[in-house]
Image (cartoon, rainbow, N blue to C red):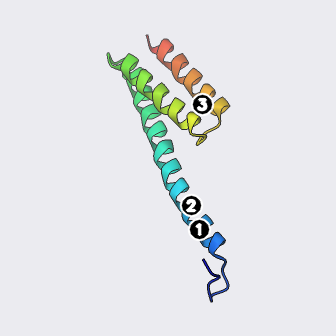
Amino acid sequence: MAKLKTGRHTSAIKAQRQAEKRTSANKGLIKKVRLATKTVKASAAKKAATLKDDLKKANSCIDKAAKKKTIHWKTAARKKSRLAKAANKAK
């Protein structure tokens, strides 16, 4: 690829495209984590029967986000710990 006439290098343009894709993917993962966390907290507040399943789904979402390095592994561990603590308190 040759340099464009606008003065921007093609590598910079490609890097921008990649960053947009990654940002989009990361936002989706973070949104899933946040939604799963809210579900667990709501179940814990109501002492719902689905608390165990909700906690399992939330842990899965958090692990996936950590595996793909969207969130730091220590952040994932902290989130999981706090959710488990809230779930145990609700029992």
Q: Are marks 2 and 1 in contact (CB under 8 Å)?
A: yes
What residue do we see at 43% from left, 33% from top?
Answer: 36
What residue do we see at 63% from left, 81% from top?
Answer: 2
Mark 1 or mark 3, which has the lower sequence index?
A: 1
Q: Quadrant of residue 8?
A: bottom right
Amino acid type of disc 3? Ala
Residue 11 versus residue 53 in the image, above or below: below
Q: Which residue is mark 1?
A: 14
What percent of the width, then of the height, locates residue 18?
56, 60
Disc 3, SS: helix
Amino acid type of disc 1? Lys
Indicate the quadrant containing the N terminus: top left, top right, bottom left or bottom right: bottom right
Which numbered tag is attached to residue 18?
Answer: 2
Q: Compute the Cα span from label 1 to label 3.
A: 31 Å
Indicate the quadrant containing the C terminus: top left, top right, bottom left or bottom right: top left
Residue closest to the eye, 79 or 61:
61
Q: Compute the Cα span from label 3 to label 2.
A: 25 Å
- In this view, the mark in front (3 or 2): 2
Q: Are marks 3 and 2 in contact (CB under 8 Å)?
A: no
What residue do we see at 52% from left, 23% from top?
Answer: 83
Which numbered tag is attached to residue 76?
Answer: 3
What percent of the width, then of the height, locates residue 11?
65, 70
- Specify the farthest residue to the left: 49
Mark 3 or mark 2, which has the lower sequence index?
A: 2
Amino acid type of disc 2? Gln
